[in-house]
Amino acid sequence: MSVSTPVRLTVGFMPLLDCATLVVAERKGFARAEGLELALQRETSWANIRDRLAVGHFDAAHMLAPMVVAAALGAGQMNVPLIAPLALGLGGNAITVSGPLWAAMQAHGATLGAPPGAQGAALAGAIAQRRAAGEPPLTFAMVFPFSCHNYLLRYWLASAGIDPDADIRLVVVPPPMLVTAIGSGQVDGFCVGEPWNSLAVATGLGCIVAATSDIWRRSPEKVVGVRRDWSERHPEVLAALIRAVTRAARWCDEPEHHEELARLLGAPQYVGVPSSVLRSALGGQLPFVQGAPPASRPEFLEFSHHHANVPWPEHAAWIASQMERWGQVAARPEHDAMARAAFRPDLYREAVKDGIPEAVPPTVRPEGLGTFFDE
């Protein structure tokens, strides 16, 4: 059942390929059909997104999944309970290095499209050579401390024997600034969502060494985050938002819509990069290096396939385990349950069961958590 009286929602988002479902929900009429008007507000950093949602400037927001878990565990700056009633997709990130670092990795055996383990071993060799020569450590960037970018980057580095807290310098840079940062030499590599990896390649400033779908197939990524108290006051509005975005996600996954979607997202008020760069990643084609044919990664980003819109509690539990592993929170037995409670597949299931029965998920995630490349 849609909302009977039109409701305007202010929704924050970051200029990334996976904001697509929110943009499409508004621009293609899916929100309007549910009695909603989405006032989309582009932001410059994830910290701004978090803070503006917490203080009530936003009703809902495009959020990193770990931001919701961090709030549940009392980590971060604001102690405002958040929930994730909806996920915005699976995957969509990559790891990019600068041209000079790629050349150094090639000298240690790296090749385009090689498995993550081989690329990590080449990076470890380059780091050892720098250390022996007395050179300063490399600087890698991720987009926010509580992010899957941080955890997947750390997982990849650690699997190669690289200590992310000792062997490199790890910093936070907002996604839209990363191409400039690598071009100016402020960072030697980064993990970010599209289109910023592809744009670094298109401008000749970087080389993609791994898609995160190569590290963890169908990994969790962004969610719609809302304050828990807001969700309790506005259950019908939240259900309408879930349905609108779920329908938009299904539209985004259809290949015949990708040309239109790339043009739409290319507008300055949304992502603001050339539609050709966006179109390539939408089709699972990643340009690993300038001038080379793109590499095919058909499951690189999924907006709705494989129940991509379900906020699986198993994902929240894994995220909590990474926060403990890397010292962001002290290890406590209650964290698993606290994290799981912040992801609400029950709200998602209830919202879609009548209007979108084909989107109703199973009770348990079919594939479990998936497999990492080194398992």
Image (spheres, helix red, strand yellow):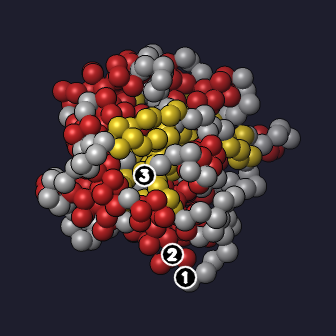
Relative side of 288 to 306, left or right: right
Foreground pick, 171 / 113: 171
Q: Alpha-carbon neighbours of circle 3 within 10 Å: few (<14), some, or many (≥20)?
A: many
Relative side of 9 to 158, left or right: left
Residue 237: give x, y in percent of width and height: 33, 53
Q: Residue at x 68, y 43 (%)?
A: 172
Q: Alpha-carbon neighbours of circle 2 within 10 Å: few (<14), some, or many (≥20)?
A: some
- Quadrant housing residue 76: bottom right
Residue 249 in view, yes or no: no
Element type at mark 1: loop
Disc 1 and disc 3: Cα gap in Å?
Answer: 23 Å
Tag shown at residue 338: 2
Q: Alpha-carbon neighbours of circle 1 within 10 Å: few (<14), some, or many (≥20)?
A: few
Q: Which residue is mark 3?
A: 223
Residue 331 in view, yes or no: yes
Q: Residue at x 54, y 82 (%)?
A: 334
Tag shown at residue 334: 1
Foreground pick, 60 / 323: 60
Q: Residue at x 46, y 59 (%)?
A: 230
Q: Amino acid at mark 3?
A: Val
Q: Residue furthest right?
A: 134
Foreground pick, 244 / 122: 244
